[in-house]
Amino acid sequence: GNALLVGVGGSGKQSLARLASFINAQDMLTILVNQSYGMDALKLDLCEFYKKAAVKPGTPHAFLMTDGQIADERFLVFINDMLSSGAIPDLFTREEYDALFGAVRNQAKAQGYTDDREGL
């Protein structure tokens, strides 16, 4: 699921998100934005996030991002794609997809999924 916490600064939104993540035994992932942080860095961080969530042992994760971490309006396109469908176009190269599929293939077969790109 998704959550959007809105309120005045200092009201405990991040603390509440971290507490909920802890209660649900989820790892909290955030990005560290600096002057040189751009689209490529965001894509790399999102790739790592997806890998941690999907590849064995796939564990539940929470992604925390504040309005101050939106260094470029184009970040919102990736966040929107992640929230709406879970699929971010062109996030992984073909070779990276093949490596990910290889990592989850046996587990997917054991769960009854087909051994093709769509099933994996």
Image (spheres, helix red, strand yellow):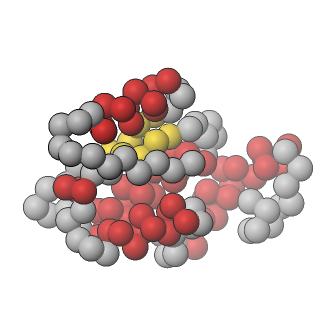
**Residue drawn at 32 percent across, 68 percent down:** 75
Return the residue nearer the eye: 33 or 10: 10
Query: Which residue appears farthest toward the right when viewing the image?
Result: 112
Q: Where residue 105 sits in the image (x, y, percent)?
A: 75, 52
For residue 119, what is the image quadrant?
Answer: bottom right
Residue 63 position (above or below residue 114): above
Q: Relative to 8, is 97 on the left or the right? A: right
* Camera-nearest residue between 10 and 61: 10
Q: Nearer the viewer, residue 85 or 2?
A: 2
Q: Is residue 32 left or right of residue 93?
A: left
Q: Quadrant of residue 80?
A: bottom left
Give the image location of residue 55, x and y in percent: 60, 46
Residue at (27% x, 73% y) in the render: 73
Number of marks in picture: 0
Residue 77: image location, x then y, percent: 40, 73
Question: Which residue is pictured at 27% across the width and 34% down the height?
Answer: 12
Instruction: Specify the quadrant of the image occupied by residue 84.
Output: bottom right
Residue 64 vertical position relative to residue 39 in the rendered view, above or below: above
In the image, 60 versus 56, the foreground residue is 60
Kindly identify the residue that appears in the image at 40 percent across and 27 percent down. Answer: 19
